[in-house]
Image: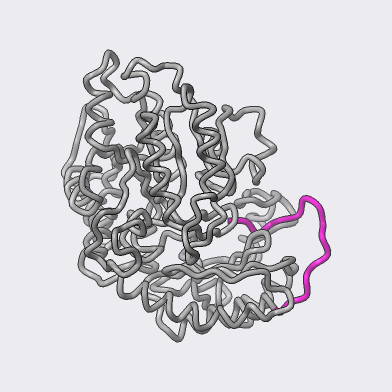
Amino acid sequence: MKRLLDFDSEHLWHPYAALKNTPARFLAKTAHGTTIETADGLKLIDAVSSWWCMAHGHNAPEIVEAIQKQSEKMCHVMFGGFTHEPAIELGEKLVNFLPEGLNKIFFADSGSIAVECAAKMAVQYQYSLGHPERCKLVALKGGYHGDTAGAMALSDPDGMHTLFRGIMPHHYFAERPNCRFDEAWNQADFASMERVVEEHKGEIAAVICEPVFQGGNGMWLYNAGYLKSLRELCDRYGILLILDEIAAGFYRTGPRFAMMHTAENGANAGENRAGFIKPDIMCIGKALTGGSITMAACVASENVAETITNSKIPAFMHGPTYMANPLACAAGIASLSLFESRDYAGKVAQIEKRLKQNLEPLRVLENAADVRVLGAIGVLELKAKPSAEDILRVIRETGVWLRPFCNYVYTMPPFITTDSEIDRICEAIKMIGECEPAPVVEGEDEFHE
């Protein structure tokens, strides 16, 4: 085990970490259900769904079996010039699973690439209408859309990507929505977006945002009324609306997709939601394959797809090597079957209730700045972060895998997580919240997103 970890430390980069002196803390051996087991026998509850994708838990038997069966037939074939049954079947399932009218599917390799595709699709749509000057997007401060260049350019301009401003295209940003999810909607909170759009409306192809839940740049939950006003504003100026549901979709915030919080009956609408706003383009990923293998999709409305198809340049100009990879499609089919057959809306409601019971009392902690809970998302925002050593001590003592970033200690557990496991997760969060703040060291932030 030491030899493996030594090699890793010397040669393998890890996310948001220096190559040396920040070795992998754990050597994962197996993962099943909610638990990751390390080579030294430590069993850890995966409280962050391995970056929010393991909705059904690790190694869901139905998904593993689907990948195994597909591997015996065909692991990959290019999607240019070919199609195949797994892609078609997954497409059929998605059309039935997605909001009505969003049914033109472009399969992508990852969430970041789905965002890149959405931005390109919006620009090509405007070009098709004779507006090549409409090639800019508007995004929200505090947002996160991925780590590729185009996705970085649409993420928080003052966030973790500032080092790379020189290679990123320039877009426009509105202030983060400050009206909390559980507060009454305040239209004044929309003033910044109105100003930006009205000032630059002749240049704007689309507005992009994470609906209701801003993830990787602050774990912020904002009022769904913002989305209603945004839909009206986009319609007024002929601007497309892109919703990035990569993290928020597939029941993570409660309903099937976060956009459904705008339904006529709001939080009380259950699965029979009606009257919710819909985007022109949406991005999905992460839980699409149940976290088993990388895959995402950029999904367009019929209007967007038909406008591009009937234009002077009818082909959408993008084509990943691993587009619609058969193994990933097989995993996606099995994952969607689980979403269809299980009452995840009910399960997430139970997780939300348990998170609130456990986390709300943490507001009294001396280092607590805020507590936020929605669906299967729980956040303890701290005034100052503890040391990495203290966080690792809590992980080992509690057997709960948490990966705080900046001042945010959060959980986004698999939907199969039990009440007792939620209680253990929350106890670990509490213990981190009780740790002494660490001395501030500029540029040192190993734990991120």
Say whether residue 367 is magenta. Answer: no
Work out whether residue 32 can be spotted: yes
Q: Residue at x 55, y 59 (%)?
A: 219
Q: Is residue 1 visible?
A: no
Quarter of the picture containing the N terminus is bottom right
Q: Pinpoint residue 148: horizontal percent, then vertical percent.
A: 53, 37
Q: Quadrant of residue 39?
A: bottom right
Percent x, y of residue 113: 43, 38
Above or below for 144 versus 168: below
Q: Position of residue 43 (x, y in %)?
A: 52, 78
Question: As rendered, which of 120 and 66 lies closer to the eye?
Answer: 120
How many numbered markers are drawn? 0
Above or below residue 269? Residue 86 is above
Q: Position of residue 193 (x, y in %)?
A: 52, 40
SS majority, magenta: loop
Look at 17% across and 47% down and name the residue there.
92
- Part of the protein shown in magenta: 434-449
Left/right of residue 445 with respect to residue 187 in the rendered view: right
| Residue 447 is a magenta residue | yes
Q: Residue at x 65, y 66 (%)?
A: 2
Figure check: 70 above or below 272? above
